[in-house]
Image: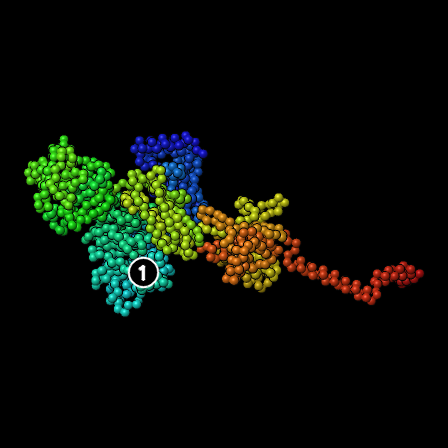
Amino acid sequence: MESPFIYVMILLLNVFEFSSGIKENHFVCSSEEVPTDNQIKLFLSMDSLKIYCRFRSESEDTSRAFLGVFTSGGLAPTLIISNSTYHEEFHFNLSLFNNRALWFIDIPRESITVNTDIAAIEEWIIKVTMHEGLNIYNTEGTLLDLVREPILQWTLGSKMSNSQVKKLFPHVIDIKVAKCPCANDVALFGFILNSTYNGVYIGKTISGFRKYNETIWYDLTDIIYSQLKDEHQGNSVQFKSFEVDYVTITFDRNRTLSESSSCFYSKEPFLHWLPCLPSTSKSTRLLPYVITFLIDQETRTGIYFFHNQNSKRISVSVSVLKNEIPNSQPKFPNFQFPSSFYHPVGMVFHPRSHFLYVYGNQVWLSMDGGNTFELVCDFLSNYVRKTAHSFYTSEISLITKNGKIYMTKAGLTRYTKSGRLGDNIFTLYYDHLGFIHKLTPERFDTDSSSSGSGMSSTIFGTPPDLGFDTALAPQYLSPNEMIFFAYVPLNEPKNMIYKRKFKNIHIGKVINYSKNGNAYIRKLLVHANGPLGFHTSVLTEIIEPFGVEESVKSSSVTGSLKISYTGNVFYHIEITTADVEKTVVRPGYSSFLITEVRDLKNVLSLATMPHKIKSPLNFPENSWFLYSFGSTKGRNWTISLKPCNYWVQQDDHDIVSLNVVKYLDVGNKANYGLKLIPNTRVPPVIVIVGNPALLEVKTEGYYDVTDSYNLNTHVASKFFHKGSTSLSMIIWEASTSCSITTVLPIMKSSCSYLKTLQHIPGRQIPREDWISGVHKDSQGFNMIKTLPINYRPPSNMGISIPLTDNIYHADPSKPRPRSLFHKSKVTGQLKQCNNVPSREMCNCTEHQKFSHAVAFSDCKEKVHRFKFPVIQYPVALEIFTEKEKFAVEPPYLVTMTEVNMRQNWQLKHNMPENVKKMKDYLEPLLNTSVYNPLGLNISIRGSELFHFKVSVVPGVSFCNLEEEFQIYVDEVPLPFPGHMLIAVATSVVLGGLIFVAFILQLRNIHPLRAFQRYLKRDTANPSTISISSEGKVWIVNK
């Protein structure tokens, strides 16, 4: 535990930071020893991840001072790597790297991800902090897996030089950007050329278009045109992607395309394309034009954005998908937009959400999959031509035809103006951290100082004033509430009235007075039937009281007032003033905006609430105020963004992502909560479920003792039905300046890829012993078996006749043992070592060498070793999830097989009545034996390697829960069939001896007696052998 002295020093350093005016102290990290870039962009390859970090401040001396304090106190930074499904902490070395002002950390790839296949994986967010929980000098960055990002494996075409790219600039009429949905820093940049220049040219980035010279350009003309075969001219194509699953192509109606064939869609791998509209209508003239067709992944519906060019009506229609084809009957009645929406452009889902936006000269938002829509903004004669989205910050930029940029947050019906761009050709792009970039053919502009705020000073300049040139007339409703009426002169031309009105853009903003005071705009009011001179007003909540005209500076605020009706909408006031557009205000009465000065003591005014005035009014001295919100001498009021007045704290500390993905298996539950810590008043929160039919969602909210608002959401699976739904928590009165306005957790009724079934060995062996291959028990028996090269387990036909296709500890350069028989020669197939000359070329990783999976049998070298016989070895199984582990027990029944088709093993388990019923039901369906995992044990009477596979029965989990483990049985008395042959031979010999003895006894033959008599006869008649001198032999019996 760190000494309190360290925290005192940190506090003093923070005080020094603020008192000295230092506004930026953060970490600069990279994979190089000399980190220079302020943005942290790291890349993961097949090698380990090496990171060098230094503490950066405005001066090198300050940086070294900070570094010295932390190092002497034993503190080093913490690296947090996370995405929507992963969260892990790593700690830098306490000692500095080579005694330099650098911290260093080396993280093996396997500690972050063990997968190396080419499959999309979400880019990680990294955070470097000095101490987790203290949030000291937090610095965010990204980590991209270069091995598993599919786009980076593509062969796009021939590379282009900078001079070749510059030749295209005069022919560019627009640009398009497409980014990877899982890794927004990986993106493609494409030119749209005029008719004088043909070709397909793409720029690729892996760092979010951070620098123009880092983009690699490719010429795809030959590749694309060779496939299209001259069909590339004359058609405009619009692509919409849906999390890489579906793609829609919409053509302009020209050349030979019919009404019904202007829109097509397909699902991966995009081999079969279907028309968006079902071909049920006999006349294609009756079909509306499909502007956009989207697939709603959550509700499995197709959503059409229609434009009927005959009736000029614009609508949205939703159809249920059946076998991937939209039903001809809509799911809901079509939503008809009003006639004021006359210029439709497109429709888009905000990434990873169920927020559906329709845009053109108006922007509409649907939260229920296209059933209903709510107006967000109206641009009148201007229109939105494209949108840019950031899932990380929920920010949405609306790019209009005249270059004005507006910004909103996902789920909010409020928006603001970011600024105006003067470039003729440009687009906006959000990187993975939510920083906005302006992309033009010639250059990239990046602002990395304001992620999620929507206000980029580098790109858009000073935030614009959202006020408009007119006078405002305040009207008190209560001490804390005030209505501001926007004045429109009675003789104002109709085509200019819109410039003097409050609009939707002003909702959620703040009215600021030049003297002092401000008020928060909560609601927009449109007056169709008066009061005259005021077409719109806003309901505000007073944050700071507004300043009034003082008697020291203006004598007109003293004395009493007499107010009378003139008979023609104006009210006469006896007051000494020479200024128009000032407002007489008395709480509890109508306010009066001065519009004309008759003489020094008489003015005409318009009443904000004329229906409240029944007779002439007398305002006594000191009972009324005079406010000056005019514009004749220069507008003295502004409208700006409301500062954020709350903080968001997530209850789930394990995952810090705002877009966390939670998996719910069959019968499981999950909780998600957040806390809003207020600065002034807690804004309300609404919860929107994308697919209410999929999961059961209950919410509860309460205020704690600190006036913080706690929202808890309880989610439970309802049916054995896979699917995904967004759970949107929208702080719907939040300011667009807040970094967090919408929290978008994704609930998946599916299997978590982190949920696994694992066999727990009865004896634990340290990893270092596995590497050495030696781990002896108390009797000196080595519990690890190193398998022979190209080993194959025996079969039921004998040790020397293996019949399995699985080869263990494979080495293609070495001969295969046990291949004497024909059946053994034709079996045995290499997997990872196939078509390579040596084991080194198999590229077996440490993970594969220690894996029990049969898929990695080529790499498997060492297994658990047991003495013969194995009696009632407990098969202990546990299920591991991202948060917990638990023993496998009913209803998780299991099946068990030996992958090499070996026998001589037997399972034993407990079978209570409930398990017996499930067993009797499942076994005929699965055509295999079903066992209770609780108390399951195995006995083995065979020798050498047994490779078992345990599987959980289907129906109790969305996951395909399987586990494999190996047992090598050694020191068997005699291998099969030697023991049997010896027993048979012994039996035959013993049987033969007994049979001979029986025959001899039956014939009364006594071999022993005959042998004894023979010996006696030889003893009684001895013989003498002699040799004469002539060489003759003489035998003489005595």
Coloring scheme of the render? rainbow
The residue under the point 13% across, 43% down is: 614
Q: Relative to 555, say whether 800 is above or below.
A: below
Instruction: Name the image quarter holding residue 944.
Output: bottom right
Tell me: residue 111, above or below residue 168.
above
Q: Left of 1021 or right of it: where is 51?
A: left
Which residue is the extreme one toward the right? 1038
In the image as oriented, which residue stretches furthest toward the front? 615
User: Does 881 sit left or right of 787 as displayed?
Assistant: left
9 vs 465, nearest the viewer: 465
Residue 896 shows in this picture: no
Q: Residue furthest left?
A: 599
How far across and how far down the image is residue 902, in percent?
A: 58, 58
Q: Which residue is denoted by mark 1 in the rendering?
A: 331
SS state under label 1? loop
Q: Residue at x 52, y 62 (%)?
A: 924
Residue sitting nearer the eye, 1036 or 146:
146
Quarter of the image where the C terminus is located: bottom right
The residue shown at (57%, 57%) is: 792
Give percent across and percent down for residue 841.
49, 53
Is residue 127 shown above or below 854? Answer: above
Residue 195 occupies quadrant = bottom left
Question: Where in the figure is residue 775, as x and y percent of width and height?
Answer: 58, 45
**Which quarter shows the N terminus?**
top left
Give the residue drawn at x 54%, y 59%.
929
Label 1, residues with CA under 10 Å away: few <14, some 14-19, many ≥20: some
**Quick check: can you spot residue 610?**
yes
**Mark 1: which amino acid?**
Lys
